[in-house]
Image: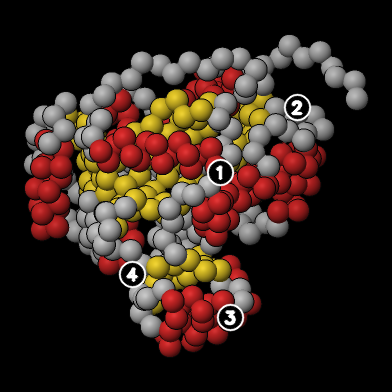
Amino acid sequence: MIAMLDSRSPTFLCITTYEKGQEFMRECKRQGCSVILLTAEKLRDADWPRESLDDTFYLPENLPIGDIVQAVSHLARTRKIDRIVALDEFDMETAATLREHLRVPGMGLTTMRYFRDKLAMRMRALDREIRVPDFVPIVHHEDIRYYMEHVPGPWVLKPRQEASAIGIKKIQTAEELWPVLEQLGDKQSSFLLEKFLPGDVYHVDSVVSENEVVFANVSKYGKPPMNVAQGGGIFTTFTVMRGGEEDSTLRAMNRNLLSALGLLRGVSHAEFIRAYADGHFYFLECAARVGGAYINEMVEAATGLNLWREWARIEIAGGDSSYNLPPVREEYAGVILSLARQEDPDTSGYADPEVFLRIKRHHHAGLVLRSADPQRIPTLLDDYARRFAEEFLAVEPPRDKPTA
């Protein structure tokens, strides 16, 4: 193959079927790149950074991946595509398939599965001696029976390729499991069964450049996300004490995990649980994306670092030029977020100087807080959660599928 000399700026194809990643696209444009957005038809009127986009293409719902490959291949006849980036977890397979078909650099299908398939990531972590809750694939029924005989319930039945707590079911007894599997039919192999561990849930949000974790921020959820997603309530998360035992232990586990999963460059959102029973940390799941629920805004409040922006800068560097992490602060931040009864809830009554950002989203009340004092944020969140429950809280049935 003869390579052409190419002095033009790189072209990024950004794929997302959810409204997110605007700052990634803006940063690509600021750095002189061309940006093409591939998104869902239903998001035609979404708040995209149109001033930063060279072109936008809209896909009909449920378009087969083979048709997407054909459409992008046709586009590539006249537009040289240098990078393909999935801005949401649910688009990672599409992006990896396109990279492999067009031979564009970046994460391929095998590595992608370590960040999308809960079974693959658990087995990989276990191979590297990273502690995970006891689990069994929903494949061979004799293995499942043996597992339930030797691992006491309750358990959680988890979809292998959903995000967060979507589609998770708590199973109390073996007799309860089999009718659920029967109902799943041929889809049951897309699930795993895992020991339910009561505990505190943490997340580590990272920036990775050339296999090295160059930035990590460790935070702790108020209520575990599964409890909020399935039972309703107030979502909170906050930065843990920097340099403390939780911080140092989870940073080390996160480095080992990302090395095991093979993330070369980009960002990640990893979740861990500290079991009440034994005090050990266990790995739960990891995604090669920016965390949702305004976690990016929380990280930026505490450190000054915008994860979307740094992800773009790392992708642009692409291993061919050095990436330098900008200076970061080491302060503390938190998020509180609730589904609200009001269409546009008024949070003006929350006037403490730590309020960094008021979240504007229909039928949601939310705030991002910032402080130099590590104790101030969790104290405020406890108080605000009580007030949110009285003033705003609404509850809807848990979702089986994600919504845009």
State if disc 2 and disc 3 touch (CB < 8 Å). no
Instruction: Classify the position of the N terminus by image quarter.
Output: top right
- Relative to 306, residue 232 above or below: below
Residue flagged by tag 1: what amino acid is it? Answer: Leu
Query: Around disc 3, counting alpha carbons within 10 Å, would you say few (fewer than 14), some (14 to 19), or many (20 or more)?
Result: few
Q: CA distance from mark 1 to mark 4?
A: 34 Å
Residue flagged by tag 4: what amino acid is it? Answer: Pro
- Residue under the point 80% across and 39% down: 74
The residue under label 1 is 261
Secondary structure of residue under mark 4? loop
Query: Around disc 2, counting alpha carbons within 10 Å, would you say few (fewer than 14), some (14 to 19), or many (20 or more)?
Result: few
Secondary structure of residue under mark 2? loop
- Relative to 157, residue 318 above or below: above
Task: Return the x and y of residue 82 as percentages of the image width and height.
Answer: 70, 27
- Numbered tag placed on residue 397 in the rendering: 4
Report the label total.
Answer: 4
- Relative to 174, residue 43 above or below: above
The earlier-in-sequence mark between 1 and 3 is 3
Q: Is residue 226 visible?
A: yes
Task: Return the x and y of residue 384 as percentages of the image width and height.
Answer: 12, 47
Residue flagged by tag 3: what amino acid is it? Answer: His
